[in-house]
Image: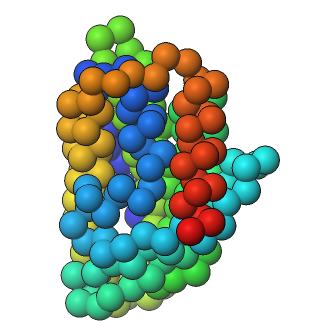
């Protein structure tokens, strides 16, 4: 399985970065290869959502749909995600925020495998630059938005309430 990792420093309050990060539907603004995101399921109790990502996969020159499960732990500023249905044999990852003395560290890791065998091993290697580019675009987009925002969220409880409200409204549309 291939693994791509990247981290970026963001000079904004951690809660503000998290507020931007939890807005999954906004990711189309940050990642050019994603055409649309549809939130399909939300479970408030176990902090889990499901979403369908429609995107262009340039390596195989195809439009793909990835149905993903995203579990979030707001108290630890952490998301875990995995593909439930789609083109990948394995696709999972994590996004984490860590508070530093002068900046927030935004860490992302994606592990993926398109398939087994020689041809798939070549494809898996080719996908590495696409996955890295998507992580970089997402992190830089969130960084730009969080650093430019003036409104701050001052407590985790407020952030959790906003996240739950936003996610449940998106799914119930």
Q: Quadrant of residue 157?
A: top right
Q: Position of residue 50 (x, y in %)?
A: 61, 66
**Relative to 24, is 31 on the left or the right?**
left
Q: Position of residue 132 (x, y in %)?
A: 27, 58
What residue is at 31 percent from the left and 71 percent from the top? 34
Figure label count? 0
Residue 110 versus residue 127 in the image, above or below:
above
Q: Quadrant of residue 90?
A: bottom right
**Relative to 55, is 41 on the left or the right?**
right
**Relative to 80, is 30 on the left or the right?**
left
Q: Nearer the viewer, residue 146 or 81?
A: 146
Residue 84 versus residue 76 in the image, above or below:
below
**Relative to 110, is 62 on the left or the right?**
left
What residue is at 36 percent from the left and 56 percent from the top? 26
Quadrant where the C terminus lies? bottom right
Looking at the image, can residue 23 be seen? yes
Q: Position of residue 2 (x, y in %)?
A: 41, 64
Residue 93 versus residue 117 in the image, above or below:
above
Q: Nearer the viewer, residue 38 or 7?
A: 38
């Amino acid at each position: 399985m291939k693994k791509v990792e990247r981290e970026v420093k963001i000079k904004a309050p951690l809660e503000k970065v998290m507020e931007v990060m939890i807005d999954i539907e906004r990711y189309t603004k940050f990642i050019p290869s994603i055409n649309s995101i549809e939130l399909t399921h939300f479970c408030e109790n176990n902090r889990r959502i499901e979403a369908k990502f429609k995107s262009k996969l340039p390596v195989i020159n195809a439009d793909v749909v990835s149905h993903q499960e995203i579990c979030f732990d707001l108290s630890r500023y952490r998301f875990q995600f995995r593909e439930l249905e789609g083109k990948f044999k394995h696709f999972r990852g994590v996004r984490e925020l860590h508070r530093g003395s002068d900046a927030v560290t935004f860490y992302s890791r994606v592990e993926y495998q398109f398939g087994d065998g020689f041809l798939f091993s070549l494809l898996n290697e080719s996908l590495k630059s696409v996955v890295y580019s998507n992580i970089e675009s997402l992190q830089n987009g969130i960084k730009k938005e969080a650093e430019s925002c003036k409104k701050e969220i001052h407590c985790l409880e407020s952030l959790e309430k906003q996240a739950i409200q936003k996610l449940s409204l998106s799914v119930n549309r």
